[in-house]
Amino acid sequence: MMTSKLEKFRRKLDQKSRATLDETLKKLGCGDFFGLDLKKLEAEDNRYRIRRGRLRIKFSINKDRKVYNIEVDWRDDNTYR
């Protein structure tokens, strides 16, 4: 289920970006990380990011490989600070 902040961000996207985000979130929900540009964030435990064009999707994974705490934002100079 999407948080209200994530849903608000999603509504502002153009159709192509929204489809890309929806596809990526669907894969995350299924635990399918294959083919995603996934990288562990160094400064934080269990935090990862996925690059999809200018979109950055940051999230956490628990011990059961469940995804939670999803944040989506545009890539800029302050994305990872």
Image (cartoon, helix red, strand yellow):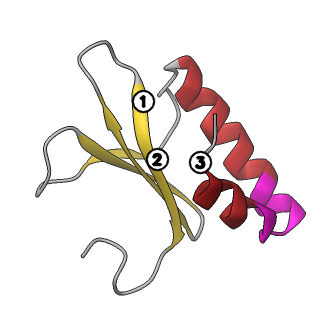
The residue closer to the viewer here, 37 or 18, is 18
Q: Which mark is residue 48?
A: none
Question: Badge 3: few (under 14), some or many (20 or more) residues near its Cα, within 10 Å?
Answer: few
Rendering quarter of residue 48: top left
Magenta stretch secondary structure, dominant? helix
Task: Indicate the amino acid at tag 2.
Answer: Ile
Image coordinates of residue 37 in percent, x first then y, are: 45, 46
- In the displayed structure, 42 sits above or below 69; it is below
Disc 3 element: loop
Task: Indicate the amino acid at tag 3.
Answer: Thr
x 78%, y 56%: residue? 18
Name the residue tied to disc 3. 3
Give the CA distance from mark 2 to mark 3: 8 Å
Give the CA distance from mark 3 to mark 1: 13 Å
Q: Earlier in the sequence, mark 3 or mark 1?
A: 3
Name the residue tied to disc 1. 67
- Please indicate whether residue 30 sits to the left or right of residue 37 in the image: right
x 63%, y 42%: residue? 2
Q: Are marks 2 and 3 in contact (CB under 8 Å)?
A: yes
- Please indicate whether residue 61 sits to the left or right of residue 32 in the image: left
Name the residue tied to disc 2. 70
In this view, which residue lies farthest toward the front? 4
Give the CA distance from mark 2 to mark 1: 8 Å
Q: Nearer the viewer, mark 3 or mark 1?
A: 3
Task: Indicate the amino acid at tag 1.
Answer: Val
x 53%, y 30%: residue? 28
Q: Are marks 2 and 1 in contact (CB under 8 Å)?
A: yes
